[in-house]
Image (spheres, rainbow, N blue to C red):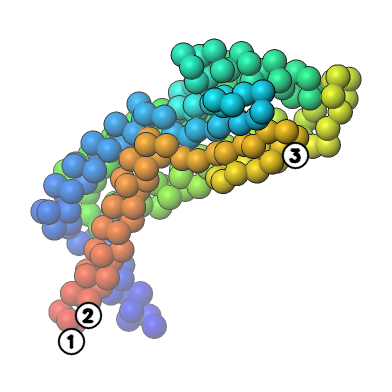
Amino acid sequence: MSQWFARFYRALARPLVPWTRVLLVLALLPLVWGATERLWTIHFLAPQYPRGLELHVYSYSIEGGNEGVDLQEINTLNHYVGMRALDPAEFADLDFLPFAIGALTLLALRVAFIGDVRALVDLAVLTGYLGVFGIGRFVYMLYTYGHHLDPRAPIHMEGFMPPVWGTREIANFTVASFPSLGTFLISSFGALVVLLALWHVVWATRSEAEAGA
C-alpha cells in the first residue's frame, strides 16, 4: 500500500499532456458564456394565468418574464400568502457566482499553461465544491422563501418547499422549475475538468507503476 501511495504522489507531479492544456483553454468558452446566460427558470401556471408567469435566475440577478412584468405579478401573489418580495437586490446569496466563475477562469488558465496533474486535480475539486455549494445555496433560498411566511398575510398557508427541479402543485398553481442554458454550459466545463483529472491520475499512476516495474 505504501508503494502505491508513493507512486500516486509522484504521479501528481507529472506535467499535463499538451492536448489537455488545449482542452482546458477551450472549456473556458462555455464557462464564460454560461455566466451571461439564464441559469434557472421557474414557471407558474394557474387558471387565472393561462399563459403562465416566469421567473428567470441569472448568476448576477433575477428577472421576471414578459420583459420583467411577471416579477411584479409574482410579488403581488406572494404578498397574499405572506412570502417576502422577490427583490433582485436581496439575492445576495448568489452574488458569489460571478466571482467564483472569474476565479475558475483564472485558475484554469494557470493550470493550462504551467500546471501539473496535482494542479488539475485541485481545479477539479474546487469546481465540484463550487457547483455543490451553488446548488445548495439555491435550495436554501427556495426553502427560506417558502417557509418564512408572514402570519398576518390575508391567506394563511403552511410552509412549503418550491420545486428545485421538477413540477409541484402549490395552492392553485402548478410550479415547474428547471435548469436553463447557462447551467448546462457551466456544467460542461465542470464535467470536462473532472474527466481530465480522473484520466490524468489513472494514466500517470500507471506510468509510474510501469517505470518502477
Query: Which residue is painted at 13% across and 58% down in the image?
Result: 17
Name the residue beneath numbered marker 2: 209
Q: Which residue is mark 1?
A: 213
Q: Quadrant of residue 173?
A: top right
Image coordinates of residue 81 in percent, x first then y, are: 79, 24
SS class of the residue under badge 1? Answer: loop
Distance in Å between CA atoms under marks 1 and 3: 61 Å
Q: Residue 55, image x and y in percent?
A: 54, 26
Kindly indicate whether the residue at mark 2 contacts the one at mark 3 (C-beta within 8 angstroms).
no
Residue 147: image location, x then y, percent: 76, 35
Secondary structure beneath label 2:
helix
Q: CA distance from mark 3 to mark 2?
A: 55 Å
Asked if marks 1 and 2 touch (Cβ < 8 Å), the reply is: yes
* Neighbour tally class for label 3: few under 14, some 14-19, many 20 plus, Cα within 10 Å: some
Q: How many marks?
A: 3
Q: What residue did someone put label 3 on? A: 160
Q: Is residue 115 above or below residue 110?
A: below
